[in-house]
Image: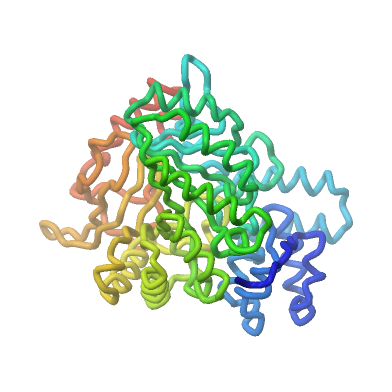
Amino acid sequence: MPDTIKYKAYSLSNFRDIPQMDEVAEAIKVDIEVVGQVLPFKTNNFVVDHLIDWAHVPADPLFVLTFPQRDMLLPHHYAEIAGLVQSGAAPAAIKEAANRIRLQLNPHPAGQISHNVPTLEGEQLDGMQHKYRETVLFFPSQGQTCHAYCSFCFRWPQFVGMSELKFASREVDRLVDYLQANPQVSDVLFTGGDPLIMSARHLAQYIEPLLDADLPNLRHIRIGTKALSYWPYKFLTDDDAQDLLALFRKVGERGKHLALMAHFNHPRELEPEPVRQAIAQVRQTGALIRTQSPLLRHINDDPELWREMWARQVLLGCVPYYMFVARDTGAQHYFAVPLVRAWEIFREAYQRVSGLCRTVRGPSMSANPGKVQVLGISEVAGEKVMQLRFIQGRNPDWVHRPFFAKYDDQATWLNELKPAFGEAKFFYQDELEAFYRESIDASHAEDYE
């Protein structure tokens, strides 16, 4: 085991204290201070000392992953905030401008607030989402931050102090009630933020009631986390590391399957010895580690990186699960890769790995109708088209139904695609619009992608 390491966070208030920042150009530091007024910024001593290659800053992909970059804001947004910061404007004025900009960045894509929040006995269950039949997402109150923030994160509104944009719930009893009333649900996904920012004691207060309720329909408990990469000591030397591992074992002993949905965005994250030891510790509890990441320009838009990452994950006993498309929120303009290129990267990487790595699915858009996978480019009846299908859908009947879009090598999201073969709409759109009209509000009926 490594020596005990104490967690130290860095943010706008103290990032200049990082010793490695002494060699970083002042203009880069100013960019961090400007962009960090709008998009969340936090990193820590493990990321700084073990993941970032400071010799290649600012282009280093792990630096881009965790430190705000100038072009993550649109030029006019950057100019507005920079002008306020450099003129010594009052914090309230900067915050007001930042909040106005944030609301222009699609803070809750894919209907997270407007269409995914479930109800029970007429009560809206804030802090939960139920979009797909088998899976409920739960946002524990104490898990709505992270050990470090990813600059691309589609849940960035959780971290910027705008309370109306947050998800959080302490009401695990209502979660149990909801699962009892919805026997079609087999999976609960604890998400955030990062649930593993919580102490083992707090996490147990959410998980143990699910085990004690003895719900026959609940088979899988998932935890979405970046802790294996950003703070592996959570599983090794933190004061409650052994309690956390014991809680993981308890889930299996009570007949439930525990899956860590681990986020790794670059193969370098798998190199540090503490990360490898943490993975081994988790696997020894019987939990399964599934890995996922979006495809991100400036960070991992290279098929060789994905090949290497999947291969290393399998070697460490993890299961490659998803390659996502960068969500249509926040700094999407900075990170997005055109869908055609995303498919080419996925295909080239997939071709280079053995069958053990080919559990991975992608590239997948988590869009309003569901998870839509780009299957490839074809020519049908003389027309060049993009073939797509649902991996998950608001209506389960949509799943694995192929459909076609006009070829567009610049489109980066589903709502930029047009149906092929002269069709007016994709097959699911009428039903989706009806769903919005009937269950939410007619004003959302056109917001179907």
Nearer to the camera, 319 or 27 = 319
For the question of whether residue 252 can be seen, the reply is yes
Q: Residue furthest left?
A: 381
Residue 168: percent from left, percent from top? 60, 36
Residue 331 quadrant: bottom right
Q: Who's the residue at 29% across and 56% down the image?
A: 374
Nearer to the camera, 231 or 130 = 231
* Left or right: 351, with 138 as reference point: left
Taking 180 as reference, is 408 above or below it?
A: below
* Left or right: 34, with 203 as reference point: right
Q: Who's the residue at 77% across and 72% down the image?
A: 18
Nearer to the camera, 200 or 69 = 200
Which quarter of the rendering shows the C terminus? Answer: top left
Residue 432: percent from left, percent from top? 33, 32
Q: Who's the residue at 40% across and 35% down the image?
A: 131
Residue 229 quadrant: bottom right
Residue 355: percent from left, percent from top? 24, 69
